[in-house]
Image (tube, rainbow, N blue to C red):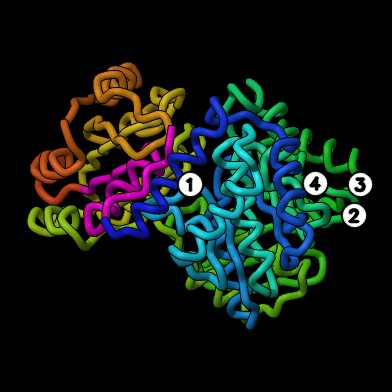
Amino acid sequence: MSTRRQDIDDALTRLARLHPKKIDLSLGRLQRLLTALGNPQDHLPPTIHVAGTNGKGSTCAYLAHMARANGQKVHVYTSPHLVDFNERIQIDSQPVGDQALIEAFARCEAANFGEPITFFEITTAAAFLLFSEHPADLLILEVGLGGRFDATNVIAKPVLCVITAIGLDHQEFLGNDIAAIAREKAGICKFGVPTIIGRQGPEAEAALLQEAGRVGALAYVWGQDFRAYQQHGRLTYEDESRVWDLPSPGLIGPHQIDNAGAAAACAAVLQWPEKCVADGIAHATWPARLQNITRGPLGEIARSHNAELWLDGGHNPAAAAALSHALADMDEREDRPLVIIAGFSPNKDVEGWCSQFAGLARRLIAVEFSSGRGGSQTADAVAAASNAADLRAETATSLLLAVKNAAKEVPAPRILIGGSLYLAGEALALGGAAPHQTPG
């Protein structure tokens, strides 16, 4: 490992020790630190704030590609990272450099004076510091968890807010039902700020509209103010004043129609040209969102067995439902037996995730990973949950062994690695450097 990579890992470990809890949703600690840093959050580029349970990252990717096609210089903030922490903070659409990141961490540590602050809060402060000191035309800012008390929600007035699909996830922090979770996500809504509400179930939509109305946000709602649908292999976007004939999304799966449609609605509100929207939708890329792995040791194993290998980080039942639909579509075009390799972070609904693939997948191979915050569930626990969901399961001692076993299961299989972005990161890292750990 290079000296700078080690310096980043050491800094991440120190920052994680500043608060006993991994997650403690509050804004007071961060506001204190930002004041000490000169309030960089007040000196950011015009900001699009993106919340939701599923589809946030893909929507950010579409928006970033559209904005770049429109000639804009774009910063992007997302989480978690897959391999390098630097991925979270993109300066002019490129991961921040090691030295700049190390220096930003050092400045935040010094200003914090050892006071309690969570890992996500202080690293978000470092991101704001970097964004404030590098001029750009736009910042695309993804919520970390929830919305109302998320560290990103110190932005006084974004130019636009987006809320993607709401589902059950992180119930221990956000609430046990869809309406409660939706209200927390809608905490990013601001008075007078246009808010794009993507396709939702009735319960989530009602809660989002109630919260947006309470604060005076200007809601633009899927199915009422705009819609998008697939037609003749292309994407049609419609609202009250335009119809756009757009390319099919560059990201794979029927659910990407929803994500691209929400991004197109943002572009319409911001009055970006149709040609830039088309370019962004067609060319958007986002790792570990139904990504086809063809290189590295895992790609080599797949090629040697005439197998397809796909990678996706969706980790809740709603994401699994969208993923299973995408894989069913693939199966209609080319029939291949599906084998799933999966690992999960603690507290995830493994049985709910696995149930989406019962009857579609041949079997599941459960694995563990080490890069996630708090580690992973045991392979035995994942296999038991999969079996309970009527998806036959076994375990493997490593991701590499699991791919080898899956490739030999049947001739020409389709293999999916899923269940966790941390597992996805370890899969991508097999072709290069070890991933930056997310400290527990």
* Residue at 51% in and 51% down: 255
Q: Position of residue 15 (x, y in %)?
A: 51, 41
Q: Amino acid at mark 1?
A: Pro
For marks 2 and 1, the one nearer the N-term is 1
Q: What label sits on residue 80 in the rendered view?
A: 1
**Foreground: 180 or 81?**
81
Q: Position of residue 351 (x, y in %)?
A: 39, 22
Q: What label sits on residue 151 in the rendered view?
A: none
Q: To which residue does mark 3 refer?
A: 216
Q: To which residue does mark 2 refer?
A: 192
Pointer 2 with pointer 4, Cβ within 8 A: no
Cα distance, mark 2 to mark 3? Answer: 6 Å
For marks 2 and 3, the one nearer the N-term is 2
Cα distance, mark 1 to mark 3? Answer: 31 Å
- Against 283, residue 331 (above or below) is above
* Residue at 53% in and 64% down: 90
Q: Amino acid at mark 2?
A: Gly
**Magenta run includes residue 424:** yes
Q: Position of residue 371 (x, y in %)?
A: 34, 39
Q: Which residues are magenta?
A: 414-440
Q: Is residue 366 visible?
A: yes
**Front label number (4 vs 1):** 1
Q: To which residue does mark 4 refer?
A: 189
For marks 3 and 4, the one nearer the N-term is 4
**Foreground: 295 or 23?**
23
Instruction: Count neighbours of disc 3 (C-alpha within 10 A) and say few if under 14, some if 14 to 19, many if 20 or more.
Output: some
Q: Is residue 390 left or right of residue 323?
A: left
Pointer 1 with pointer 3, Cβ within 8 A: no
